[in-house]
Amino acid sequence: MVDYARLATTAERLITANGRSVIMIQQGSIPVDPSEPWRGQNSSPQDAAIGEAVFIDPSNSGYGMMNINNVKRGNKICLFAANNAIGKNLENFDTITDGSAAWKIVRTEVLEPGTTRILYLFEVER
Protein backbone atom coordinates (compact mmCIF):
# COMPACT_ATOMS: atom_id res chain seq x y z
CA MET A 1 0.00 0.00 0.00
CA VAL A 2 1.23 3.50 -0.87
CA ASP A 3 2.19 5.74 2.04
CA TYR A 4 0.60 9.03 0.92
CA ALA A 5 1.71 10.87 4.07
CA ARG A 6 5.30 10.07 3.11
CA LEU A 7 4.68 11.42 -0.41
CA ALA A 8 3.26 14.62 1.09
CA THR A 9 6.39 15.00 3.22
CA THR A 10 8.59 14.46 0.15
CA ALA A 11 6.65 17.10 -1.82
CA GLU A 12 7.05 19.54 1.07
CA ARG A 13 10.79 18.85 1.31
CA LEU A 14 11.39 19.33 -2.43
CA ILE A 15 9.37 22.54 -2.66
CA THR A 16 11.00 23.96 0.48
CA ALA A 17 14.46 23.18 -0.92
CA ASN A 18 13.78 24.68 -4.36
CA GLY A 19 11.10 27.30 -3.77
CA ARG A 20 10.70 30.70 -2.22
CA SER A 21 8.46 32.03 0.51
CA VAL A 22 5.00 33.25 -0.53
CA ILE A 23 1.82 34.34 1.19
CA MET A 24 -1.46 32.77 0.09
CA ILE A 25 -4.37 35.19 0.65
CA GLN A 26 -8.12 34.64 0.77
CA GLN A 27 -9.96 37.93 0.30
CA GLY A 28 -12.98 38.81 2.38
CA SER A 29 -16.37 37.94 0.96
CA ILE A 30 -18.53 40.39 2.92
CA PRO A 31 -19.76 43.40 0.89
CA VAL A 32 -18.33 46.78 1.87
CA ASP A 33 -21.90 48.07 2.10
CA PRO A 34 -24.46 45.27 2.71
CA SER A 35 -27.25 47.45 1.29
CA GLU A 36 -25.29 47.71 -2.01
CA PRO A 37 -23.50 44.35 -2.50
CA TRP A 38 -22.98 45.02 -6.21
CA ARG A 39 -20.37 47.66 -5.32
CA GLY A 40 -17.85 44.99 -4.39
CA GLN A 41 -16.44 42.87 -1.63
CA ASN A 42 -14.28 43.89 1.27
CA SER A 43 -10.69 43.66 0.03
CA SER A 44 -9.11 43.02 3.41
CA PRO A 45 -7.75 39.48 3.80
CA GLN A 46 -10.02 36.96 5.47
CA ASP A 47 -7.33 34.28 5.82
CA ALA A 48 -3.69 33.69 4.91
CA ALA A 49 -1.14 30.89 4.74
CA ILE A 50 2.62 31.30 4.49
CA GLY A 51 4.91 28.73 2.93
CA GLU A 52 7.31 27.96 0.13
CA ALA A 53 6.19 27.66 -3.48
CA VAL A 54 7.76 26.87 -6.83
CA PHE A 55 6.73 28.77 -9.96
CA ILE A 56 7.11 27.09 -13.35
CA ASP A 57 6.33 28.05 -16.92
CA PRO A 58 3.32 26.06 -18.23
CA SER A 59 4.94 25.51 -21.64
CA ASN A 60 7.91 23.74 -20.03
CA SER A 61 5.84 21.51 -17.77
CA GLY A 62 3.80 19.47 -20.22
CA TYR A 63 0.80 20.74 -18.28
CA GLY A 64 0.57 23.78 -20.55
CA MET A 65 -0.29 21.50 -23.45
CA MET A 66 -3.67 20.78 -21.90
CA ASN A 67 -6.47 22.99 -23.18
CA ILE A 68 -9.57 22.39 -21.12
CA ASN A 69 -12.76 23.73 -22.75
CA ASN A 70 -10.76 26.42 -24.59
CA VAL A 71 -10.42 28.40 -21.36
CA LYS A 72 -7.58 30.91 -21.04
CA ARG A 73 -4.78 29.48 -18.94
CA GLY A 74 -2.62 31.33 -16.42
CA ASN A 75 0.84 32.81 -17.06
CA LYS A 76 2.59 30.55 -14.53
CA ILE A 77 1.96 27.44 -12.50
CA CYS A 78 2.58 27.63 -8.78
CA LEU A 79 3.19 24.42 -6.83
CA PHE A 80 2.51 24.60 -3.08
CA ALA A 81 2.95 21.67 -0.70
CA ALA A 82 -0.29 20.85 1.12
CA ASN A 83 1.65 20.28 4.37
CA ASN A 84 2.52 24.00 4.32
CA ALA A 85 -1.19 24.89 4.33
CA ILE A 86 -1.39 23.76 7.97
CA GLY A 87 -4.88 22.29 7.69
CA LYS A 88 -6.34 25.09 5.54
CA ASN A 89 -8.16 24.35 2.32
CA LEU A 90 -6.59 26.67 -0.23
CA GLU A 91 -9.14 26.05 -2.99
CA ASN A 92 -10.97 29.30 -2.14
CA PHE A 93 -7.88 31.50 -1.88
CA ASP A 94 -7.61 34.40 -4.33
CA THR A 95 -4.05 35.71 -4.58
CA ILE A 96 -0.42 34.79 -3.99
CA THR A 97 2.05 37.42 -2.83
CA ASP A 98 5.56 36.60 -4.00
CA GLY A 99 7.83 39.33 -2.64
CA SER A 100 6.59 42.49 -4.36
CA ALA A 101 4.63 40.60 -7.04
CA ALA A 102 0.96 39.74 -6.64
CA TRP A 103 -0.44 36.80 -8.60
CA LYS A 104 -4.17 36.25 -9.13
CA ILE A 105 -5.21 32.60 -8.85
CA VAL A 106 -7.06 31.58 -12.01
CA ARG A 107 -7.59 27.90 -11.23
CA THR A 108 -6.72 25.46 -8.46
CA GLU A 109 -6.18 21.72 -8.52
CA VAL A 110 -5.37 19.50 -5.56
CA LEU A 111 -3.45 16.25 -5.71
CA GLU A 112 -5.36 14.34 -3.06
CA PRO A 113 -5.35 10.56 -3.19
CA GLY A 114 -7.87 9.39 -0.64
CA THR A 115 -7.89 11.77 2.30
CA THR A 116 -4.23 12.84 2.08
CA ARG A 117 -3.56 16.20 0.44
CA ILE A 118 -0.14 16.19 -1.20
CA LEU A 119 0.15 19.17 -3.52
CA TYR A 120 -1.72 22.27 -4.71
CA LEU A 121 -1.33 23.36 -8.32
CA PHE A 122 -2.39 26.96 -8.95
CA GLU A 123 -2.63 28.54 -12.39
CA VAL A 124 -1.77 32.18 -11.78
CA GLU A 125 -1.57 35.43 -13.73
CA ARG A 126 -0.49 38.96 -12.92
Image: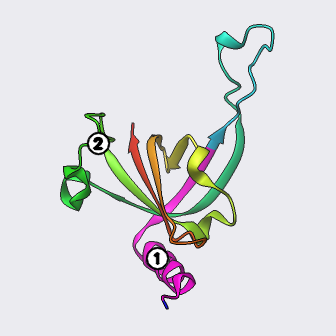
**Circle 1 crowding by C-alpha within 10 Å: few under 14, some 14–19, many from 20:** some
26 left or right of 32 in image = left
- Disc nearer the start of the sequence (1/2): 1
Circles 1, 2 touching at the beta carbon (< 8 Å): no
For residue 79, the mark is none
Q: Residue at x 63, y 63 (%)?
A: 85
| Disc number lying in front (1 or 2) | 2
Measured as percent of width and height from the top left, residue 19 is found at 43, 67
Q: Answer whether residue 24 is magenta in the image.
A: yes
Numbered tag placed on residue 11 in the rendering: 1
Left or right for 57, reference 13: left
99, 17: nearer the viewer: 17
Amino acid type, callout 1: Ala
Judging depth in this view, the residue of 7 and 20 nearest the camera is: 7
Where disc 2 sits, the SS reads loop
Prevailing secondary structure of the magenta residues: helix
Please name the residue shown 65% across and 17% down the image: 40
Q: Position of residue 106 (x, y in %)?
A: 43, 39
Residue drawn at x 68%, y 66% is: 86
In the image, is residue 86 above or below residue 95? below
Q: In the rendered view, would you say 36 is above or below 52? A: above
Magenta residues? 2-25
Q: Which mark is residue 68?
A: 2
Secondary structure of the residue carrying tag 1 is helix
Q: Amino acid at mark 2?
A: Ile
Q: In the shown orientation, is residue 66 left or right of residue 105?
A: left
The location of residue 115, given as percent across then percent down, is: 61, 71
Specify few, some or many for label 2: CA neighbours under 10 Å numbering under 14, 14-19, or 20 or more.
Answer: few
**Which residue is pictured at 25% across the width and 52% down the height?**
58
Q: Which residue occupies the extreme bottom position in the image?
A: 1
Front residue (pair 47, 72): 72
